[in-house]
Amino acid sequence: MKTFRSILYVLFCIPVLFMLVWIIAIPDGVIRRQIEDAVARAGNKSLNLQVDGFKKGVFFSLHADSLNLSIDGRPALKITDFTGSYSPRYLASGQLAVTIRGKIGTGKVSGTVKLPLEGKIIIDRAELSSVPYLTQFNININGSLSSEINIIHDVVKMNIDVPDLNIDDRDSVIPLLNTFRRMQGAISIKGNSIRFDSISLEGEKGYARLKGNITNNVMDLYLELMPIAGTLNTMESMLIGKYIVSPGYYVVPIRGAVR
């Protein structure tokens, strides 16, 4: 019985000792810098993460007022009210894992990130107006974004859905952009390249597909337009006329530096 009690005592003391080392011996700044450096290495230094208001908690938990992600030095995403906690369920497969929660605007973010780097993150009804990267295109984009994000080493793949898209393109030269009401598709991010694998748009005047890449902040995209016959006004018909490929099918190139 005494031996059994000793074993229980040791089993209790080991995690307590680790928690005390975590809380007392490891400074918050060291953990914060390790997190920021890990993101920079994963993105070949094209990604930068700034963690504000970082604090560690008991049971290997993490808290931050905000996570600010930049791509090539440009603000891309801000997650607020961030929490992360150690998840022991993956130890059997030899992986360390952290479950995360946070907000993008009023939308929710949740998921699991594992080492070696992989994970799945779910975004639920995040406001597009709260995504800083989109403001660089001189277009006001509103709507609620839902997404499943899969991370495998240095590749991030996103499936996106925006059922209530609203675009104000008064300063844009892209035709029909403000007529689309839903956006769906897939995006891949690797290093300093964002690939639009296939983004579909639909609205009252027809359909479109966006494909191509943004690499080193330079756009090489094209928008395929398939308007519904009889829905375009005279000005809209004139705007897309020079891009006609075949009756009812137009391809608009979108090239140049992201401003």
Image (cartoon, rainbow, N blue to C red):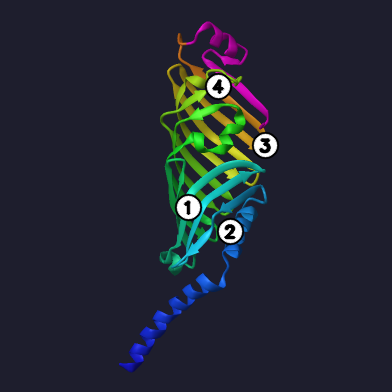
Residue at 45%, 14% (x, y): give it: 228
Indicate the quadrant where residue 92 lies: bottom left
Callout 1 touching callout 3 (CB < 8 Å): no
Q: Is 20 drawn above or below residue 7 in the view shown?
A: above
- For the magenta stretch, what is the residue range? 232-259
Question: Is 234 drawn above or below residue 66 in the view shown?
Answer: above
Image coords of residue 188 (percent x, y): 56, 42
Q: Is residue 53 left or right of residue 12?
A: right
Q: Which three-letter amino acid code belongs to the residue tagged 2?
A: Ile
Is residue 56 located in the magenta-colored stretch of the structure? Answer: no
Q: Which residue is mark 4?
A: 169
Q: Position of residue 100 (x, y in %)?
A: 45, 55
Check disc 3 and report its element: helix, strand or loop.
loop
Describe residue 145's horizontal placement relative to residue 138 as left or right: left
Task: Quickly name the residue at label 3.
Answer: 217
- Residue type highlighted by circle 1: Phe
Mark 3 or mark 2, which is nearer the start of the sequence? Answer: 2
Mark nearest the camera among 4 and 1 is 1
Q: Nearer the viewer, mark 1 or mark 3?
A: 1
Which residue is denoted by mark 1 in the rendering? Answer: 82
Q: Earlier in the sequence, mark 1 or mark 3?
A: 1
- Label 2, label 4: how many angstroms apart (C-alpha)? 38 Å
